Image (tube, grey):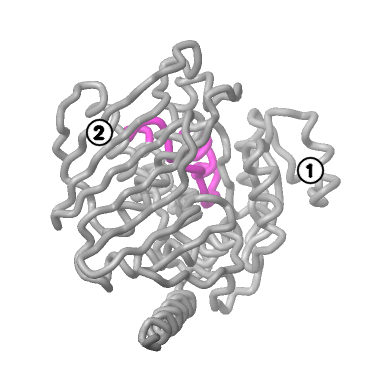
Amino acid sequence: MSDQPIKRRKFIAKSVQAASLLALSSSAYAIGGCTADTRKLGIALLGLGSYATNQLAPALEHTQHCRLAGIVTGTPSKIGAWQKNYAIPDKNVYNYDNFDSIKNNRDIDIVYVVTPNALHMPFVVRAAEAGKHVICEKPMEISSDRCKTMITACEKAGKKLQIGYRLQYDPYHQQLMRLGQKQEFGKVKLVNTGFSFYGVNNDNWRFTDAKLSGGGPLMDIGIYSLQGVRYSLGEEPISITAQRYKTIMDKLPDMEETICWQMEFPSGAVANCTSSYVARENYIRVSSEKGVFGLEPAFSYDGLEGYINQGVMPPQTHIQQAAQMDAFALNIKENTPVIASGEEGLRDMVIIEAIYEAARSGKKIIL
């Protein structure tokens, strides 16, 4: 048998590994960064739900440029455990009523807003007016107008704003950006992506209160697919078509159960996207003129797996939330632009509004 297939596989493996190492070494968002300012910036978590408890607080124990310094909660019963687990002093504990007094606390540099979606805007505005830099979870808010209010408030206060797009700081997703935007395998022609889970029976605000969530799976997990397409191409869509479906009528009040949407881009590339609370998908596949690359699973907190043509992307040891928060701390220390900025969150919200309008009207929406 010819040894050409073996040589080709070795070549692909080495090429993939070299490309991955190059992406990591040149990344401005990997944990570590270089700065003369060695002080760790203090972060206060506002909203102590599952994400803050199980992801953000543990990740802060692995950061190099920031630390968990305070908490803001509307649930007094949570305070004791947080103080015990993270040695948070009484003076750095706030509730939603006395939150504005955080402006006098020099221990706190950043407020991370982790509330339901429709509460992002008021707390981001209050944090900026208190003189704090702000991280806000995604989606940025439930309307583009509210996003604009948040951006204006932070600009007026002279404070930086980051949206919690953790995957923009993940090495695998940075590979997608590099391969697609630099057209390593020619022009991208088609992107297929889906992020779904069977969550229709869940009972927290995401699944029961459309006024807080702003919508169904599109506002929760579909935004990851939207982001993935946009940064794999480095382009903004010029038109949207969409369809929404519901099969279990007594669940998800005033929300979609499944939504599919299609995007066209200036380069001629097209994208097919799906998000659902009654399915199981977690992938992105980017097809170009001379190759294909992607991730599956693509959008999880860890355990991502990637491929480039016949090769497998080398595994990475990486804490997404730690990298995201460290990158923001470095943006503050070095006064550099924020990658996952408020403007980035606003762009997604404008597209999400167009997706919902396309699904409602049955018409193609031109952006």
Which amino acid, mark 2? Ala
- Vertical order, 195 against 219 (above or below): below
Disc ID at residue 354: 2
Q: Residue at x 83, y 40 (%)?
A: 81
Q: Which mark is in front, 1 or 2?
A: 2
Whole-number angstrom distance, CA of label 1 to CA of label 2: 41 Å
> From which residue to which does the magenta span run?
121-146
Disc sitting over residue 82 in the figure: 1
Relative to 136, 319 lies left or right = right
Residue 127 among those drawn in magenta: yes
Q: Amino acid at mark 1?
A: Trp
Question: Foreground: 210 or 259?
Answer: 259
Q: Point out residue 17 in the picture as x, y percentages from the top left corner.
A: 47, 79
Q: Is residue 26 visible?
A: no
Q: Residues within 10 Å of mark 1 (few under 14, many from 20)?
A: some
Between 44 and 106, which is closer to the camera in this rendering? Answer: 44
- Residue at 24% from the left image edge and 63% from the top image edge: 288
